Image (cartoon, rainbow, N blue to C red):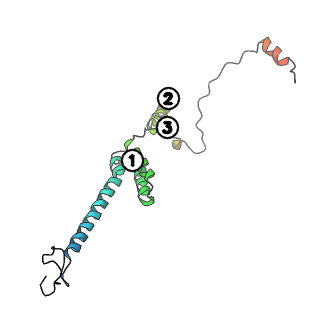
Amino acid sequence: MTDAILNPLAPHSLPWFIASPGQTDMLSVFAGGFLLVAVMGVGVIYLRIHSLPERSAHAGRKIQFEVVAILGLLSLLTHNHLFWVAGLLLAFIDIPDFAGPLRSMAASLGRLSGRNGDEARFTDLPPGSVAEPPVAIAAPLPPAPAATAAIAAEPRDA
């Protein structure tokens, strides 16, 4: 600042951030830049933490990854943290494979019935046919003992 513009009552050594009239306010420029970098940094950290369940579920099965991604998106859009916690737990927990043993049982039953395990599907049956288990012929039942018939013949008290 020049001495002509300076008020005589003002101190003669002013800090660097006080600008002369018509000059750029450097403190405002630095504060604005710092604020911009800080907001961008916090946003990047927030989104990195927010995508943690999706990144950890990416190595798992496709259906588990999709469910975790949907839960993450719901938590981001609704600001409901329960969805994020559920997605995080689902990402770190292995869901057991229920379809594998069922496929193995179906293939075994198909081999037992004389069909190949790959052909043991209901879609391979011709239209109108029904897959029925083989019927075993059982021996006739023995007659009921006399004591059972006597109990059935007694009158009941009402």
Residue 99 location in percent, x, y? 46, 39
Q: Nearer the viewer, residue 50 or 113?
A: 50
Which comes before the other along the chain, label 3 or label 2? 2
Which comes before the other along the chain, label 1 or label 2? 1
Question: Residue drawn 51% across and 42% down?
Answer: 124
Q: Residues within 10 Å of mark 2 (few under 14, many from 20)?
A: few
Which comes before the other along the chain, label 1 or label 3? 1
Q: Residues within 10 Å of mark 3 (few under 14, many from 20)?
A: some
Residue bearing the label numbered 3: 120
Disc sitting over residue 112 in the figure: 2
Disc sitting over residue 1 in the figure: none
Residue 143 location in percent, x, y? 75, 15
The three-letter amino acid code for the residue at tag 3 is Ala
The secondary structure type at the circle numbered 3 is loop
The three-letter amino acid code for the residue at tag 1 is Leu
Residue bearing the label numbered 1: 88
Residue 56 appearing in the image: yes
Q: Nearer the viewer, residue 104 or 30?
A: 30
Residue 147 location in percent, x, y? 79, 12
Q: Nearer the viewer, residue 120 or 94?
A: 94
Residue 116 appearing in the image: no
Please state which of the two labelled residues, at mark 1 or mark 3, is closer to the viewer. Answer: 1
Pointer 1 with pointer 3, Cβ within 8 A: no
Question: Residue drawn 30% across and 60% down?
Answer: 42
Q: Is residue 148 above or below residue 44?
A: above
The single residue placed furthest to the bottom in the displayed view is 4
Pointer 3 with pointer 2, Cβ within 8 A: no
Q: CA distance from mark 1 to mark 3?
A: 39 Å
